[in-house]
Amino acid sequence: MKKCGVSVLLVMVSFSLLAQLQGSENKVSDSLRLNLQNSKTAADKVKWLGALSSYYMGIDKSVSDKYWKEQSNTAENSRDRKLMIDALFTNARRHLNMGGRVDYLNIATAYSEKALALSKASNMDEYEAWAYILLAQSALVNGKKDPALNYSNLAESIASGSDNDSLKISSALQLGHTYLQKNERMLAFRSYLRATNMAEEMKNFDLQETCYYSLSQFYSGLDDYEQAKDYLYKVIALTKKYNKPYDRLSAYNTMGSIYSSNKQQEIAISFFEKALALADTLNFELIKLNTYGAMWNTYLSRDKAKEALDFLNTQTELKRFFTQSGYDYFIDQTKGMAYAEIGKLDSAAIYLAKAEKGFEQNANIYSRHSFYMGMSYFSMLQKDYQKALAYALKGKAIADATGSIELQARDAQKLDSIYQNLGDFKSSYRYNRQYQQATDSLEKITLDKELALAEVENENKRAQREEALAAEAQRERHNIQYMGITAAIAGVFIVLVMLGIFSVSQNTIRVLGFFAFIFLFEFIILLADNKIHHWTHGEPWKVLLIKIALISILLPLHHYTEKKVIHYITSRKMFELNRESFFSRFKKKEAPAAD
């Protein structure tokens, strides 16, 4: 059971935005400002003002607000509904990315609803679907799973009738996220798989990356860390293929967290070190905050509050980021739990009291639950069982509201222990019963996880079988076509030879011969093409060299054989041979009559 109950939300820099920008933090912001200065149209201004607003959200909220207000005014004055909705989306997304604070989450929800209303009034179905996706995301962060499912289904319904592949993929992913939160794992997997197939067909980097991350998270939730790693390695390979170093840095951080969850700390540290080294290569200090934050989380996830605090004290930039972003109550909580860990309960109480105000006012529902149960544990250390009970009941109310069986089991067990210490054995028995019921449900969920893994494996094998069957059908279809082409070429040459036997004009023979040999040698090149691409893996320079060598052989051979064959046929030798054969047979038949 988690002792410290610390939960941390780090705001990740938008790598999709920064992927094409190289250099330091100043160079990135300078590049965005330069793009804004060079903007000629309202659409360009809205685009780059939104980018600047999102960029500064985790750095300086006042600057971020300034850019968003300018974006909103520009869109409003243009009277272009698309730009007006884009501005509303920007405000929703930048606050949703900081969803660890309930006030930001409420703003994200409010502006998503405004975007939805304007989309409906403007008959813009695709924008309506994007608004539903944002509302589903907000609902999930707030623990409202049923509304999230409703929003996801509405987005999916609109996307299915759209030609926008990005919208189809995004809606499928969001539906998968919602199913996953509702423990509908097979439905979630099918949604993820459908989105991944579409993204791979499009060969779109951003969409493929998002799909692979989603599948990695899916397998991680099933405790199948090897499959989770496989998809992260796919992300890393993708970033190398498309030369996306910032995205690779993010993948290294996520890979480190996965290895840490799998209790492979040395490998986890090696990936964090790779991320830091890459950040140094890119000369971009800001992105290091994501790595430091991920490393801090590994300590907290293992209930190492003292080590987490020691690490945090070495990272002044990370501490400043939390303070500027309004998450300083996480730091106070970490300090309090660290002091509690080493037995300094009075010092711990001071920092936890400071943290409580921030959690009560700003934290989202899951962070508040974590804090309440941590405070209950701390009150137990103080032997203040009434206070421990009050905090545990607050946490249990959140667990019941979210419908999380894991949290319900953990909280019921905690309440059972507290009531035993208070001598209230009737209440203790009641919560012990709840704990047993929740434990039975958790065992069923564990079994469901195993069944889900088996079903997912079966689904993968079925997809592989279908792919193999489709490949076999394609191969058979191609073989039939090759046989047909071969027969057609043979037929053309038979006709060509027959024309040489009969009295046909030389021009006719030359024309047919010209097309017959083109047909033959193009077929040879067609057969060679498949092998060439297989050998070279489509490398252009290798394909070019091999084709130059092949053409240098086939071209003169083509001209030589065509010239010789056409000359032989048009010289009438075939006709003379045919006539001699005809008369010789006639003479043999007349010979007996002469006797």
Image: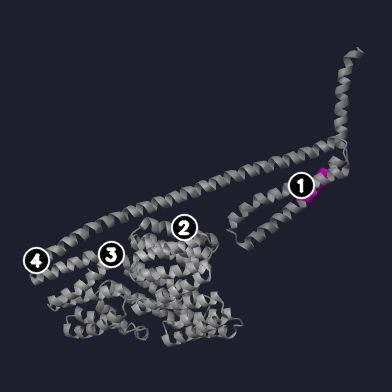
Number of residues whose C-alpha sits closer than 10 Å to that of mark 2, classed few (under 14), some (14–19) or many (20 or more): some
Q: Amino acid at mark 2?
A: Arg
Determine the secondary structure under disc 4: helix
Marks 1 and 2, Cα distance to the nearest angstrom?
A: 47 Å
Q: Earlier in the sequence, mark 4 or mark 2?
A: 2
Q: Nearer the viewer, mark 1 or mark 4?
A: 4
Q: What element does badge 3 sit on?
A: loop
Label 4 environment density (alpha carbons within 10 Å; few <14, some 14–19, many ≥20): some
Q: Residue furthest top?
A: 595
Front residue (pair 112, 179):
112
Front: mark 1 or 3: 3
Measure the C-alpha gap from mark 3 to mark 4.
Answer: 26 Å
| Residue indicated by mark 3 | 403
| Three-letter code for the amino acid on which mark 3 is drawn | Gly
Q: Which mark is residue 127?
A: none
Mark sitting earlier along the chain (1/3): 3
- Earlier-in-chain disc, 3 versus 4: 3
Q: Give the CA separation, mark 1 to mark 3.
A: 75 Å
In the rendered structure, are the residues bearing label 1 and label 4 in contact, judged by CB atoms less than 8 Å apart? Answer: no
Say few, some or many: other residues with alpha carbon within 10 Å of mark 3 (under 14 / 14 to 19 / 20 or more).
Answer: some
Residue type beneath disc 1: Phe
Q: Quadrant of residue 594?
A: top right
Q: Which residues are magenta?
A: 558-566
Query: Can you identify the residue that label 1 sits on?
Result: 517
Q: Which residue is mark 2?
A: 194
Gap in angstroms between the C-alphas marked 1 and 4: 98 Å
**The disc label shown at residue 425, or none:** 4
Left or right of 586? Residue 244 is: left
> Is residue 348 in the magenta section?
no
Choose between 283 and 64: the one closer to the eye: 64
Residue 361 to residue 271: above or below = below
